[in-house]
Each structure stands twice: as C-alpha cells, then as structure tokens.
Image (cartoon, grey):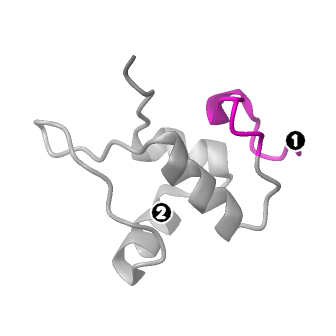
Amino acid sequence: MDEKRYSTKQVARIVGVTTQTIYNWLRAGTIPEPPRDYRGHRLFRNEDLRLMLAHRGKILPPRDRSVQDQKPDEEA
C-alpha cells in the first residue's frame, strides 16, 4: 500500500507554520529534502511530518495513527 504524501502547503498547515518556514528548514538542513514528483513539487511523507512536529516541540501521535488525522495544535 502506498504511503500518503503531502504538499508543502499541507505540511505547513499540519505543523502550524508557514510555507516559508518549511523552505527555511529545508535550506538550513533542519529537515531532509523530500523526493519530488514529476513536476518538481516536494512530496513529504508521514515520517517527514513527524520530524517537523518534533522540531516544533509538538507531542507526536502514535505511529499507528496517521499524522494527517492530527490537528495543528492537538496533542496526542
């Protein structure tokens, strides 16, 4: 089964930051560069979201719960 992928805009909304913050983290090497689709758009995975939530000091959801189910300020 294919893992859900997220756009930069979706990731920013879930993590609770701006897209510019995501770009800054990528440029600084704070988070790894994700793969891109055929158009060159970044495709973030659940594990990428977990890293960003950890960087923001958020409590991470359990591994069996999809990150997309978590609201930006919700604690697991």
Q: Is residue 51 magenta?
A: no
Quadrant location of residue 3? top left
Q: Which mark is residue 48?
A: none
Q: Position of residue 47 (x, y in %)?
A: 52, 48
Q: Which mark is residue 22?
A: 2
Query: Type of residue at label 2?
Result: Ile
Q: Residues within 10 Å of mark 1 (few under 14, many from 20)?
A: few
**What percent of the width, then of the height, locates residue 64?**
70, 30
Q: Is residue 52 left or right of residue 9?
A: right
Q: Say the numbered circle drawn on residue 76.
A: 1
User: Seen in the image, is 37 located left or right of residue 71?
Assistant: left
Q: Main secondary structure of the magenta part?
A: loop
The structure residue drawn at horizontal position 79% and vertical position 59%, both measured from the top left corner, is: 58
How far across and down, in percent of the image, does residue 48 sit?
A: 49, 52
- Viewed as shown, does residue 16 lie left or right of 2? right
The residue under the point 39% across, 70% down is: 26
Looking at marks 2 and 1 on the same chain, the residue that comes earlier in the sequence is marked by 2
